[in-house]
Image: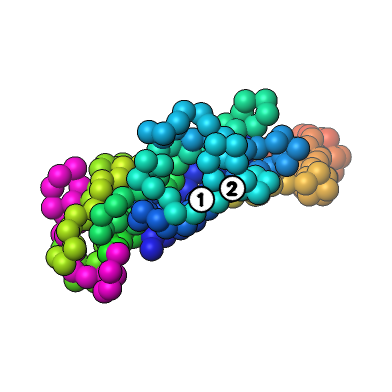
């Protein structure tokens, strides 16, 4: 099986079980519209070699609300599937390949998010279902895995491409395209660190008003005493003349 995280889609999101872009002929396939608005009347549609824009229940499969079940699926039912509302809104699309062969590559049906891991499985129709397999991307061998599983760690845009596998015992799978989408970006709230830092700096450089009043009073007293000393008073010691005192001069 595979594990990964995907896009968020508008209004409705199409999922498929088994969660793989490839299935064997005559297997059971279930599709479902995960909807935000059930009143929109979402239905399943497809384009295949048999039909175009046809609706589940009316032309193929068995409809059950916003879900559709296909029993004994055939290779001719390979194609593109999607959800559509009465107003014509559409969901994401899913490409499903139905093979009459003996090997399928289980791979993501939805785009893989950058930075996440994805595991591909080379599954065979007959036991053992997971034998030694070679994995290819765009026609080039990536590596050989004895368990039939290959994990791509920290997926990036360069991992996007056409993948297939070759089982040592049962042959080759069809090819499936794996899409990679960018990371979801969110707007971070304004940092409180710099703001509080500026606030702290401002607070430390600006003393409160009640700090300055005593300092101003002391300064006034010092200046007043200095003036009295310079002006002197009658009979003061060290007066140059009556009622006059000479202040020290700068040299």
Dot 1 surroundings within 10 Å: few (below 14), some, or many (20 or more)?
some
Counting from the top left corner in percent of width and height, residue 185 is at 50, 41
Depth check, front residue: 75 or 106: 75
Residue at (65%, 49%) from the top-left corner? 64
Is residue 37 in the magenta section? no
Element type where label 1 sits in the image:
strand
**Residue 58 visible somewhere in the drawing:** yes
Please tell me how many numbered marks the rendered image carries: 2
Residue 213 sits in quarter: top right
Q: Residue 70: give its label.
A: 1
Residue at (13%, 47%) from the top-left corner? 140
- Picture layout, residue 216 above or below residue 102: above
**Residue 113 visible somewhere in the drawing:** no
The quarter of the picture where the N terminus appears is bottom left
Depth check, front residue: 202 or 30: 30
Disc 2 and disc 1 in contact, CB within 8 angstroms: yes
- Picture layout, residue 19 above or below residue 249: below
Counting from the top left corner in percent of width and height, residue 158 is at 26, 42
Furthest-right residue in this view: 234
Q: What's the magenta region?
A: 125-143
What residue does disc 2 label?
62
């Amino acid at each position: 099986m595979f594990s990964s995280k995907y896009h968020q889609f508008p209004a409705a999101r199409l999922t498929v079980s088994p969660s793989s872009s490839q299935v064997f002929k005559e297997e059971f396939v279930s599709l479902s519209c995960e909807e935000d608005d059930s009143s929109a009347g979402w239905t399943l549609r497809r384009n295949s070699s048999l039909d175009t824009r046809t609706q589940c229940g009316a032309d193929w499969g068995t409809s059950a609300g916003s879900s559709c079940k296909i029993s004994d699926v055939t290779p001719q039912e390979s194609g593109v599937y999607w959800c559509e509302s009465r107003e014509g809104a559409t969901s994401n699309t899913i490409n499903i390949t139905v093979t009459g062969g003996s090997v399928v590559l289980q791979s993501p049906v939805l785009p893989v998010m950058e930075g996440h891991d994805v595991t591909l499985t080379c599954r065979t129709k007959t036991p053992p279902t997971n034998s030694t397999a070679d994995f290819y991307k765009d026609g080039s061998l990536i590596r050989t895995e004895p368990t039939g599983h290959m994990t791509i760690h920290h997926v990036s845009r360069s991992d996007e491409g056409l993948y297939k596998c070759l089982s040592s015992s049962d042959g080759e799978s069809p090819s499936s395209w794996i899409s990679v989408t960018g990371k979801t970006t969110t707007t971070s709230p304004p940092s409180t660190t710099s703001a509080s830092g500026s606030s702290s700096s401002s607070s430390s450089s600006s003393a409160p008003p009640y700090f300055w009043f005593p300092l101003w009073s002391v300064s006034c007293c010092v200046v007043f005493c200095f003036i009295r000393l310079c002006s002197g008073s009658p009979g003061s010691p060290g007066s140059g003349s009556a009622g006059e005192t000479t202040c020290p001069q700068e040299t």
